[in-house]
Amino acid sequence: MYRNAALLAGVISCAIALLFLGWMVVSINSLPLWIVMLVTMGMLVFDFYQAMKEEDSDNPNSSA
């Protein structure tokens, strides 16, 4: 139950952050900002993936 709630909260928060950062990139439209925002978005998604993978490995009831 807790894992599903954490997954849902993580997906929603990542989606909101990506929408906001994407909107900022499109509205300002400068190359240095594109680079910074794309790296930031990549780190956000990678960190979320690692957190979910780590949580899954900590759970002794996982099927992996």
Image (tube, rainbow, N blue to C red):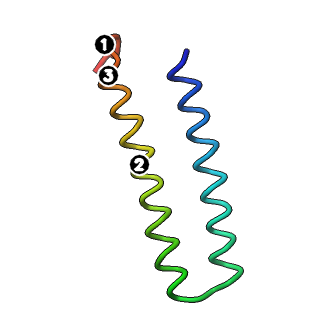
Amino acid type, mark 2: Asp
Q: What residue is pinned by disc 1?
A: 60
Which badge, 3 or 2, is on the more N-terminal residue?
2
Amino acid type, mark 3: Asp
Which badge, 1 or 2, is on the more N-terminal residue?
2
Q: Residues within 10 Å of mark 2 (few under 14, many from 20)?
A: few
Q: What residue is pinned by disc 2?
A: 47
Q: Is residue 54 above or below residue 22?
A: above
The quadrant in which the C terminus is found is top left
Point 34% across, 10% down: residue? 61
Q: What residue is pinned by disc 3?
A: 58
Q: Quadrant of residue 18?
A: bottom right
Point 30% across, 12% down: residue? 60
Distance of label 1 from label 2 (alpha carbons):
22 Å
Q: Report whether 6 appears left or right of 45.
A: right
CB-based contact (under 8 Å), mark 3 and mark 2: no
> What is the count of numbered marks?
3
Amino acid type, mark 1: Pro
Q: Report whether 49 appears left or right of 19.
A: left
Q: Is residue 61 above or below residue 4?
A: above
